[in-house]
Amino acid sequence: MPALLGLARAIDRFSSWLGILIGGVTLLMIGVGLFNVFGRFADRYLGTAFSSNSLLELQWYLFSVIFLLGGAYVLSVDEHVRVDVLYGRLAPKRRALINLLGTLLFLLPFCVIVLWVAIPWFQLSYGIQESSSDPGGLLRWPIKLLLPIGFVLLFIQGVSEAIKAAGALSGHYEYRSQDELDEVTALAAAVQLEGGQLDRAGLDGLLVGLPDEAEKQMNDNQRKK
């Protein structure tokens, strides 16, 4: 299980990096949208040619990037909308069991089905070099490529969620709320401020929800001083 939890942590770190990337894409999309708005006014009243079909399509292309590639990150931080009003009232191990069964029976099979449909769909679009029917529009196949990529990333993150749920059921992992994660982050920063470095045991302890090793190292650093 420690090796599998290590894999889950690696996947979560990658998803965190992906979340930063998606944040940048979001800002870019907002910028393109604002440019399109002001460009249309400039074209209308000043006779310029700032706006174009390619820029309009680029705006929803970027939205597609956010939606399709950001799903894995949102899953990693448990921010998908839950409609089960009972879930939050259950004990941690029961929540872990629901997460494990939901991931294995629904999420992962759904990702496989979407990939089975989406990959040939993309291949057909790429084979004919499909492009927009609007004058000056963009190629269509790059945006269709995002669909299989997004669900591959979601599948990989689903593997991480299944591992963490199995770890919670076996007592090797503890689910944490966002407030508790913020406390763990503060604890890691405190260790660094004390002049210490988290070794593998301390870092693993923080990441799997067992900060005892990190606290021990911080106390050791204080005694050394």
Image: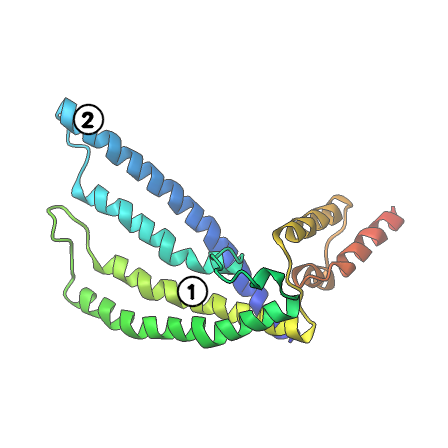
Query: Measured from the top left, where is residue 100 in percent x and y?
Result: 54, 73
- Position above or below: 29 against 220: above
- Pointer 1 local density, CA inside 10 Å: few below 14, some 14–19, many at least 20: many
Q: Dot 1: what SS?
A: helix
Query: Measured from the top left, where is residue 142 in percent x and y?
Result: 26, 58
Most foreground residue, 196 or 10: 10
Query: Is residue 181 found left or right of 13 in the rendered image?
Result: right
Residue at image coords 25%, 46%: 58
Q: CA distance from mark 1 to mark 2?
A: 40 Å
Most foreground residue, 131 or 155: 155
Query: Is residue 98 found left or right of 176 in the rendered image?
Result: left
Quadrant of res 177: bottom right
- Pointer 2 local density, CA inside 10 Å: few below 14, some 14–19, many at least 20: some
Q: Kindly identify the amino acid type of the residue bearing the numbered disc 1.
A: Leu
Q: Kindly identify the amino acid type of the residue bearing the numbered disc 2.
A: Ala
Q: Which mark is residue 153?
A: 1
Label 1 or label 2, whichever comes before in sequence order: 2
Question: Among all residues in the image, which is located at the extreme front?
Answer: 85
Most foreground residue, 175 or 28: 175
- Position above or below: 17 against 168: above
What's the image's color scheme?
Answer: rainbow
Q: Considering the image in quadrants, where does the N terminus appear?
A: bottom right
Quadrant of res 34: top left
Quadrant of res 140: bottom left
- Position above or below: 20 against 10: above
Query: Measured from the top left, where is residue 191 in percent x and y?
Result: 75, 49
Residue at image coords 53%, 68%: 160
Where is mark 2, residue-wise?
Answer: 42
Residue at image coords 38%, 46%: 25
Query: Is residue 121 found left or right of 166 in the rendered image?
Result: left
Q: Dot 2: what SS?
A: helix
